[in-house]
Image (tube, rainbow, N blue to C red):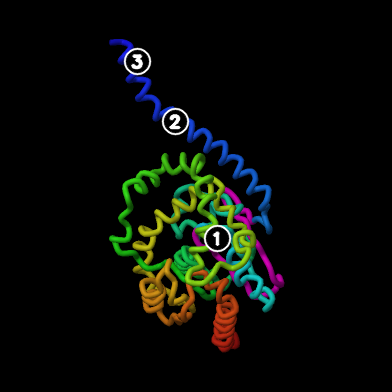
């Protein structure tokens, strides 16, 4: 009887042993991935010290140029908007500052999981701009960072001269969009998410990264060399993987809280989106957002998808320059008075 019981206990323990082995191998692989990616993609610009940490930036253009702040979306870093439109704006004479959002690229995850809220990231970005002596600035937010740019304008209006919201995620989402399969609900639990991000998460994400990069460009084709150009592999680092999951999971509640405040905005706003975006559909986000913000101007790009700042970079840059010029003309009489 004791032999049978021992055999049963051994059989029951096997799955846990296999799981432990998988997680152990994943932890080693994740450490190697983290070190290799960090060495291959060192910081590309100066850091800004803020309370409890620092933010990484990439900067371009003349120091005395009109400031433009670029904020990247999910699964990205400062290189994404900088290489899409930032270099073009710098060539046009603007002072361009692209931030790695807290927990992304080389920026610290200041405030930990609490930083998943756009309002918290807005406070940190506002502090960084204040310490840099920059502002008010024209703020560009792509995708997830549309919510961040709006939070910056709502809570720190003195820092913002205008908003450019590109393929923005900003409107509260219907509850049916928030229902997740049971395994996702398990995976996003804080202890499980932390464990996965430091074991099997990075190797799995590395495998899917090339296909993900292609899919995000649909219906256009991926810009040649895009992953290398924007240092896309930085998102595979364990801390960034966890930050990315936290940001995505926490966004719906944040939008429900800040969405009703959009009617209070008095900052000039340009909303620009592709009408063929399969990831953030313009009819459910950009269009109603432009209606919710007093005086906002909406530009829909026919046939363009989510990565408009790459596939329609010239048009997007032209729209930003035109928008900025209009702001300056409207402000000139006030400055004379």
Residue 6: image tag: 3
> Which callout, 1 or 2, points to the residue nearer the camera?
2
Residue 102: percent from the left, percent from the top? 54, 54
Q: Is residue 314 magenta?
A: no
Q: Nearer the viewer, residue 263 or 205?
A: 205
Q: Is residue 59 magenta?
A: yes
Q: Are marks 1 and 2 in contact (CB under 8 Å)?
A: no
Mark 1 element type: helix
Residue 336: percent from the left, percent from the top? 60, 88
- Measured Cα–Cα span from mark 1 to mark 3: 59 Å
Q: From the viewer's perspective, is 184 left or right of 274?
A: left
* Above or below: residue 45 compared with residue 11: below
Q: From the viewer's perspective, is 63 left or right of 163?
A: right
> Which callout, 1 or 3, points to the residue nearer the camera?
3
Q: Which residues are magenta?
A: 48-74
Residue occupying image coordinates x 46% and y 42%: 196
Q: Which residue is mark 2?
A: 18
Mark 1 neighbour density, 10 Å: few (under 14) some (14–19) many (20 or more): many
- Measured Cα–Cα span from mark 3 to mark 2: 18 Å
Mark 3 element type: helix
Q: Which residue is mark 1?
A: 125
* Above or below: residue 124 compared with residue 289: above
Mark 3 neighbour density, 10 Å: few (under 14) some (14–19) many (20 or more): few
Residue occupying image coordinates x 56% and y 80%: 315
């Amino acid at each position: 009887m004791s032999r049978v019981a021992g055999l049963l206990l051994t059989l029951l323990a096997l799955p846990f042993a296999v799981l432990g082995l998988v997680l152990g191998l994943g932890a080693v692989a994740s450490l190697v991935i983290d070190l290799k990616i960090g060495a291959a993609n060192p910081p590309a610009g100066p850091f800004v010290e803020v309370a409890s940490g620092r933010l990484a930036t990439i900067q371009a253009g003349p120091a005395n140029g009109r400031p433009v702040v670029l904020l990247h979306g999910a699964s990205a870093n400062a290189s994404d908007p900088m290489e899409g439109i930032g270099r073009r704006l710098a060539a046009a004479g603007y002072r361009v500052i692209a931030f790695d959002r807290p927990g992304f690229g080389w920026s610290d995850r200041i405030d930990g999981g609490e930083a998943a809220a756009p309002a918290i990231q807005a406070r940190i970005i506002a502090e960084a701009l204040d310490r840099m002596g920059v502002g008010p600035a024209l703020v560009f937010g792509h995708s997830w960072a549309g919510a961040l740019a709006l939070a910056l304008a709502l809570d720190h209006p003195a820092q913002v001269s205008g908003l450019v919201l590109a393929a923005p995620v900003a409107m509260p989402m219907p509850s049916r969009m928030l229902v997740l399969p049971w395994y996702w609900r398990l995976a996003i639990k804080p202890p499980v998410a932390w464990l996965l991000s430091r074991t099997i998460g990075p190797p799995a994400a590395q495998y899917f990264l090339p296909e993900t990069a292609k899919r995000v460009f649909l219906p256009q084709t991926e810009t040649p060399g895009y992953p290398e150009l924007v240092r896309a592999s930085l998102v595979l680092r364990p801390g960034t993987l966890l930050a990315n999951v936290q940001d995505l999971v926490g966004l719906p509640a944040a939008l429900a809280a800040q969405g009703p405040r959009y009617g209070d905005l008095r900052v000039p706003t340009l909303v620009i989106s592709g009408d063929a975006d399969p990831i953030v559909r313009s009819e459910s986000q950009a269009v109603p957002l432009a209606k919710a913000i007093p005086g906002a101007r909406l530009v829909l790009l026919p046939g363009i998808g989510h990565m408009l700042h790459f596939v329609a970079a010239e048009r997007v840059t032209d729209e930003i320059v035109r928008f900025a010029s209009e702001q300056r003309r409207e402000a000139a009489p006030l400055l004379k008075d």
